[in-house]
Image: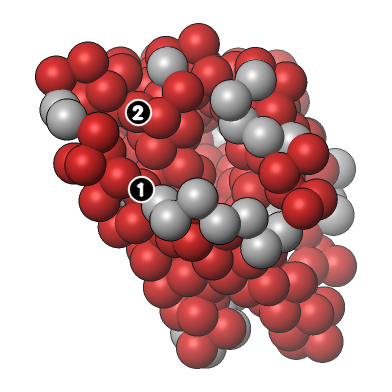
Amino acid sequence: MFWRGLRFGMFLQLAVGPVWLFVFQTAGTHGIAAGLSGAVGAMLIDGLYIALSGLGVAALMERPGVQRVVKLLGCAVLVLFGINTLLGCFDLSPLPSLSLLGSASLSGAFWQTLLLTASGPMTILLWSGVFSTQVVELGLSRQQIVFYGLGCLCATPIGLTIASLLGSVCRQFFPALVIQILNGVVGAALILFGVRMVAKKTAAAPDRPK
């Protein structure tokens, strides 16, 4: 079950999302250690959401009113991170609170990525859908569900380590101007992800790329 979960988790990693882009940008700007620190933060939140899904918290998240509030909060965080990243290309820091958690430090990268991952709690619905489908189709026991969840969780650090490695390579071989442009692209992408989160109609089990 662990390997089945890992394969499914790696499949989800193929859909590049805001967290993957942010870790890539962090490693490209501040080095691979900062990117890996961010990957740890993302893994902790994913682990929390997987656990909550197993406990049935996803049922609460399926309520339209709750989903609406969650989407708005998630959108706000993504847009704020996007604006901060975008204007950071011009040495501007419109969000002092994020600057205090500057991703130049390992702890800063950890907390920023943790916050960014937590801004998309709709993931609970995704994991809930996965588990319920597997339980019904495969008749999984509680122990098998645990191993399946662990496999899914392990895919997060693997995917984000790849993002860190790619970002670090860009940092070493690309000139500063190219890195600055990449940061601007990532900032714009984060804003786009936030806007799309609100624009999308509420779904029973929405897909959320990592």
Residue 48, by quadrant, is top right
Between 86 and 158, which is closer to the camera in this rendering? 86
Q: Amino acid at mark 1?
A: Asn
| Residue 131 image point, x, y percent | 60, 43
Judge whether residue 206 can be spotted in this image.
no
Q: Earlier in the sequence, mark 1 or mark 2?
A: 2
The location of residue 27, given as percent across then percent down, is 41, 25
Residue that badge 1 annotates: 183
Residue toward you, 97 or 67: 97
Identify which amino acid the numbered label 2 is placed on. Gly
Q: Residues within 10 Å of mark 2 (few under 14, many from 20)?
A: many
- Depth check, front residue: 205 or 186: 186
Question: Considering depth in this image, is 174 or 74 the residue closer to the camera?
Answer: 174
Assign a secondary structure to mark 2: helix
Residue farthest top in this picture = 33
Residue 199 vertical position relative to residue 196 in the rendered view, above or below: below
Which residue lies under the disc numbered 2?
A: 28
Number of numbered tags placed on the structure image: 2
User: Eyeballing the image, is 111 above or below 127?
Assistant: above
Q: Is residue 201 above or below residue 109?
A: below
Are the residues flagged by discs 1 and 2 in contact, CB closer than 8 Å? yes
Quarter holding residue 149: top right
Q: Is residue 183 left or right of residue 195?
A: left
* Residue drawn 49% across the image and 61% down it: 87
Q: Secondary structure at mark 1?
A: helix
Mark number, residue 104: none
Residue that appears at 77% across and 53% down = 96
- Which image quarter is the C terminus in? top left
Disc 1 and disc 2: Cα gap in Å? Answer: 9 Å
Residue at 78% across, 39% down: 100
